Amino acid sequence: MAKLTMNYSAVYQKVSEFLGYTAIGTAPTGTNLTTVKDIVARGLRQFFYPIDVRSGNSHDWSFLRQYYTITTKADQWKFPLPPDFSEVLTNLVFDAQRGYPDVVRRDAQQIKQMRSLSEFKSFPEFFAVTPAKYDLEIGTTYEMWMYPTPNQKYVLSFFYRIDPLKPEATTDLMVGGIKATEAILESCLAIAEQQEDDTIGMHTQIAADLIQRLIVADSDVVESDLIGNLHGHLHGYNSFGRYWPRERFLLTNTNTDLVYDGD
């Protein structure tokens, strides 16, 4: 049973029809296909990172949040993150060892400093995210550092924001489901009229309106999700809704933005 969302070929075919490259129901080929695929890529980028006009701040789509689990190994403190990783959104929570406090984020430089001061092994208390390497096909990849070095297997989970991978197969579905379909399509048509017709026309206006309407609806989803434990995780609390006394050593980094003061 088919859903009302659109796949990759349906979107770039609509762009092709709008530009007059092909007749309705006909797929583009050659240089026309290259052009419309480029337009769709630009339209997707514009849609993925919108500005909420109410606040002037960027909006993070709830459907770009991904749940992820890391299983540590004894004596290993670096762990690769998924290729679509963009930004960690919550602290790390122990899945099985319920008595442990959440693992909170620190700067990668601070993790290195901790290791230089005392390289001991225990349950992880801090983590950092840092670039691992640059890959020509998927761009920059990331890894997670933990301190102390895990002394055994621990199962940790968290939410992160994805950078969606570029669609390739004609059957690849657009991210965001049915609610986002029209906004994505209009974003691509808006790029088409701006790039090929050099004008800001009807589709640009429709895309802006649909994106803002979707932001309002999506904000309600995000705000409701922040009620409860996730709200605490985002603000440095542990699973019990309070801070956990956790310092084992003094940090010598004088950058007050990085040093944890226990409050």
Image: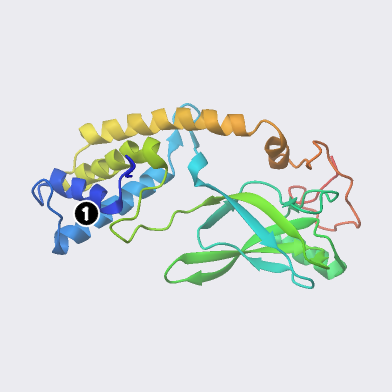
- Answer left or right for 77 relative to 210: right
- Frontmost residue, 181 versus 54: 181
The percent position of residue 60, horizontal first and vertical second, equals 51, 41
The percent position of residue 43, horizontal first and vertical second, equals 32, 47
Colouring chosen for the image of the structure: rainbow
Q: Is residue 195 visible?
A: yes
The percent position of residue 147, horizontal first and vertical second, equals 79, 62
Q: Is residue 60 visible?
A: no
Instruction: Tell me the residue at 80%/66% (across/down).
Output: 150
Instruction: Tell me the residue at 88%/50% (across/down).
Output: 246
Q: Picture quarter containing residue 227?
A: top right
User: Where's the N terminus, which quadrant?
Assistant: top left
- Answer left or right for 224 relative to 214: right
- Frontmost residue, 134 versus 223: 223
- Frontmost residue, 70 versus 184: 70
The percent position of residue 111, horizontal first and vertical second, equals 76, 62
Density class for disc 1 (Cα within 10 Å; few <14, some 14-19, many ≥20) is many
Q: Residue furthest front?
A: 1
Q: Amino acid at mark 1?
A: Val
Can you identify the residue that label 1 sits on?
Answer: 36
